[in-house]
Image: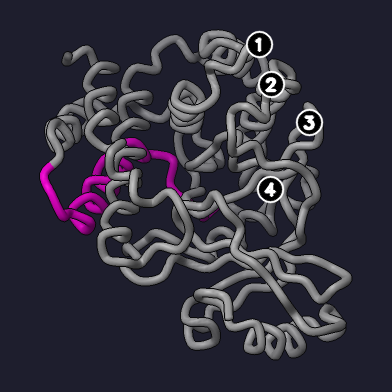
Amino acid sequence: MLPGLDLHVLRRYLDDAVPGLVRGDLSGEVIAGGRSNLTYVVTDGTDRWVVRRPPLGHVLATAHDMGREYRVLTALSPTGYPVPSTITFSADPDLVGAPFYVMQFVEGDVHREASSLAAFVPSLIFDLVDRLADLHAVDYGSVGLGDFGRPDGYNERQVRRWKKQLDLSRSRSVPGLDELHLLLAASPPPVRQGTIVHGDFRIDNAIAVGTRIVGVLDWEMSTLGDPLSDLALLLLYTADRTLSVPGHPSLDDMVSQYASRSGRDVSDLHWYRAMAAFKLAVISEGIHFRFTQGLTVGDGFDVVGERVAPLAAMGHDFLGEN
C-alpha cells in the first residue's frame, strides 16, 4: 500500500466518479521532489494519472487546500495555459484520509537537479519567465476566479498568514526570523494590479519538453494577489538552485524578460524579495517540524531545517538591515 493512498479505495471511487476511466488494477508510486503535498503517479497498465493529497499529519489551517488546486487548474485549462487537465476531486476525508484530486499525467521532464538544465539554458529559463508573465495576464474574472482571492491588502495578509503558519510550526528559536516579520509588517507595498498568483513558481514545479514549459504544477498556494510576489519567489529559488548553471540567464536578465513580457514596473523588488525569503523560511520550518514528528514521506527532509536561519538573514539583507 502506498503511504496515504489506498489504491483499492481509489479504484472504487474512480469507478463511481468517472465510469470507464480505469480499465485494470491500479499500481502507483510517490513522486520524488515534493516537500509538502503528497503526489502519486498511478496507472492501470495502460494510462497514467496523478493523484494529489495533503501531507500526513500536522496540516496547517488554510494550507494544502486540494479544492483550491483543483479549481484553479480546472479554470486555467480551457485558456490554453500549460496545466494538466483535471479529472475529479473528492472533498471526503474518509476515503484516503484527506481530500484529494486526480489529474492527467503530463509527459516531460521535471528539472529537480540543476545539472539537468545545462543543455536547455538560457531558452528554457526565459520560457519559464514568459509563462509566469502569461499567468499574470489571465483575466481571472473571465475564467470564473473572480472570488478566488482579494488582491487589495494581499501583501499585508501574506505577512500575517506566514507569521501564523510559523507560530503553528514552532519547535525551536530561529535567529532573525521574528525580527524579519516585524520589518515586513511595517512596510507592505500596495498591490498595483491584482492577478492570479501561483505562490510557488519555480523550475522544478514545471514540466518541460526541451526548451518549452508544457505543464505548471503545485498550485496549493495560488490565489489572487500581487504578481511581483511570484516574480520575487522565482528569483529566490533561481539564485539558490540553478543560477550557477553555465549559460543560465542572470537574475537581472530574468527580471528584464518579465518586464518586457508583462509590461509591469519591476523597479523596486526589495520588499518582495525579503518577503519571499520569509515565506520560504516558514515553509522550510514547517517541513522541519513535520520531519521531527516523523510525518514526512521521502528523502531529504532531514536537512531542510538547516535552511531556515540563512533565509532569515537573506531577508534582512534584501531590506538593507544587515
* Drawn side of residue 20 relative to residue 79, left or right: right
Mark 4 surroundings within 10 Å by alpha-carbon count, few (fewer than 14), some (14 through 19), many (20 or more): few
Give the residue type that dot 2 points to.
Answer: Ala
> For the magenta stretch, what is the residue range?
146-173
Q: Is residue 156 magenta?
A: yes
Disc 1 + disc 2, Cβ < 8 Å: yes
The numbered mark at residue 142 is: 4
Residue 132 found in image quarter: top right
The amino acid sitting under disc 4 is Ser
- Circle count: 4
Query: What separation in Å lies between label 2 and label 3 (alpha carbons)?
Result: 14 Å
Q: Residue at x 50, y 27 (%)?
A: 241
Label 2 element class: loop
Q: Nearer the viewer, residue 191 or 166?
A: 166
Q: Amino acid at mark 1?
A: Gly
Separation of residues labelled 4 and 1 (CA atoms): 39 Å
Q: Amino acid at mark 3?
A: Arg
- Residue bearing the label numbered 2: 118
- How much space separates mark 1 and mark 2, taking CA atoms? 7 Å
Residue 180: x and y in percent read 18, 30
Residue occupied by mark 3? 212
The quarter holding residue 1 reads bottom right
- What residue is pinned by disc 1? 247
State the separation of the CA atoms marked 4 and 3: 26 Å
The answer for how far apart the CA atoms under marks 3 and 1 are is 16 Å
Question: Is residue 250 magenta-colored?
Answer: no
- Of label 4 and label 1, which has the lower sequence position? 4
At 34% from the left and 44% from the top, the residue drawn is 303
Residue 174's place in the image compared with 271, above or below, is below
121 lies left or right of 229: right
Q: Is residue 5 above or below residue 250?
A: below
Q: Is residue 140 visible?
A: yes
